[in-house]
Image (cartoon, rainbow, N blue to C red):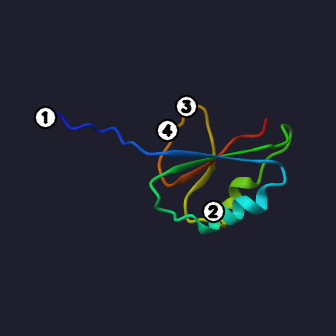
Amino acid sequence: MKQSTRQDFLIVAIGASAGGLEPLETFFTHVPADTGMAFAVVQHLAPDHATFLPHLLGKCTSMPVEQAQDQARVAPNRVYIIPPN
């Protein structure tokens, strides 16, 4: 029997307005870092400004926090932030 290399896991999408930093920080402070889920944070961001959200949320969790990239492979136990615009 051929073993599959596919790994199934949940992707949790979290939406927030521009003022949603505090609830996001509270959430990631309390969620375990080993849930086996990936988290996608969708927050209203100004299209012409760099975001510090990955850095700020990185202080609230031991999971890696990074800006989402086109064609990137999503992995569990990570936080992905949408890019501005």
Residue at mark 2: 28
Q: In the rendering, at what x and y percent does residue 68 appear?
A: 63, 41
Number of the front mark, 1 or 4: 1
> From this viewpoint, is residue 6 visible?
yes
- Specify whether 76 is left or right of 7: right
Q: State the separation of the CA atoms marked 3 and 4.
A: 6 Å
Residue 8 placement: quadrant? top left
* Mark 4 surroundings: few (<14), some (14-19) or many (≥20) residues within 10 A: few
* Mark 3 surroundings: few (<14), some (14-19) or many (≥20) residues within 10 A: few
Q: Earlier in the sequence, mark 1 or mark 4?
A: 1
Image mark for residue 1: 1
Identify the amino acid type marked 1. Met
Residue at mark 3: 71
Q: Earlier in the sequence, mark 1 or mark 2?
A: 1
Q: Residue, x 51% and y 63% (percent of image)?
A: 33
Q: In the rendering, at what x and y percent does residue 57 appear?
A: 68, 60
Q: State the separation of the CA atoms marked 3 and 1.
A: 31 Å
* Mark 1 surroundings: few (<14), some (14-19) or many (≥20) residues within 10 A: few
Q: Secondary structure at mark 4?
A: loop
Q: Secondary structure at mark 2?
A: helix
- Specify whether 82 is left or right of 77: right
Q: State the separation of the CA atoms marked 1 and 2.
A: 40 Å
* Mark 2 surroundings: few (<14), some (14-19) or many (≥20) residues within 10 A: some
| Viewer-nearest residue: 36 or 57 | 36
Residue 84 placement: quadrant? top right
Q: Is residue 47 above or below residue 19?
A: above
